[in-house]
Amino acid sequence: MNNLYAAARPNAGQLKKSLAMAVLAGLLLTGCGGKQAAVEPASAATPAASATAEAAVAVPGVVGMTLDKAKKQLEDLGFKVEAVDSVDGKKILVDKNWQVLTQDPAGGATPAKGSTVRLGVKSLEKIAEEKAATEKAAADIAAAEAAAAAKAAADKAAAEQAAQAAAAQAAADQAARDQAAADQAARDAAAQQAQKAPAPVAPAPAAPAPAAAYYANCTAARAAGAAPVYAGTPGYGKHLDRDGDGIGCDK
């Protein structure tokens, strides 16, 4: 019995040896864990340093471009894009039908890669409508200015024509007054001249022929101062008018 117990009982030297090996193994494991823990922070710092060292990308300026081209350019550089109708708040269906009005961040900024660029857009249809309205307003203004200029020119021409007519009438009136003055001066001069001229001497009246004159012959008619004697006058007789021409004593 004692022999069996002694055989089953472990050797003291073997126990010590096993215990020493266990302690050594524990020390090895503890050392490896500490070393790993010391190394891990260095490896964890590598991605941050890599991200910091990565080159920043500048945001391109896309204002004025159609939305489809602006999105492609931004997305090709790794940016995200958010677009909204900054005028009417309408839903954007077809990118190519919209134009970029504003962007945030602005062109030239250098945000982190993958940042979102927000775009304010307006529909090309509305832009066309506004352009047409602006052109119509400009055309209306030009037409109004042209009409005003034409009216001003017509008014000026009418005023000049009226002034010319008034000047011509004034000249005619002056000419009439001058002519009247000249005529009056002529009449006055004639009157003065008439006052200065001697009065004409009236000729002595001829002695009337006797109512019943008779001349025996032309000698008697001449002596009486009645020759020649005309038919129908006192003293005419056919004996004095031998040629019968109505005049007696004419030869």
Image: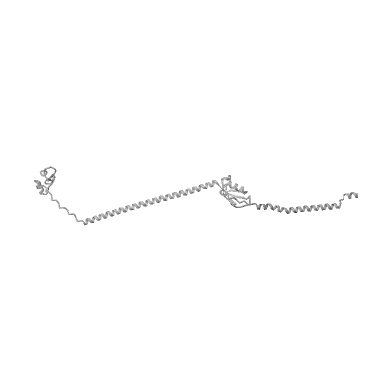
What's the colour scheme? Answer: one colour
State left or right for residue 15 relative to residue 128: right
The residue sitting at the top extreme is 244
Residue 174 placed where, x, y %? 32, 54
218 or 202, nearer to the observer? 218
Residue 120 placed where, x, y %? 58, 49
Q: How many marks?
A: 0
The residue sitting at the left extreme is 216
231 or 225, nearer to the observer? 225
State left or right for residue 69 relative to residue 153: right
Quarter holding the C terminus is top left
State left or right for residue 126 relative to residue 201: right
164 or 57, nearer to the observer? 57
Residue 6 placed where, x, y %? 89, 50
Residue 20 placed where, x, y %? 82, 53
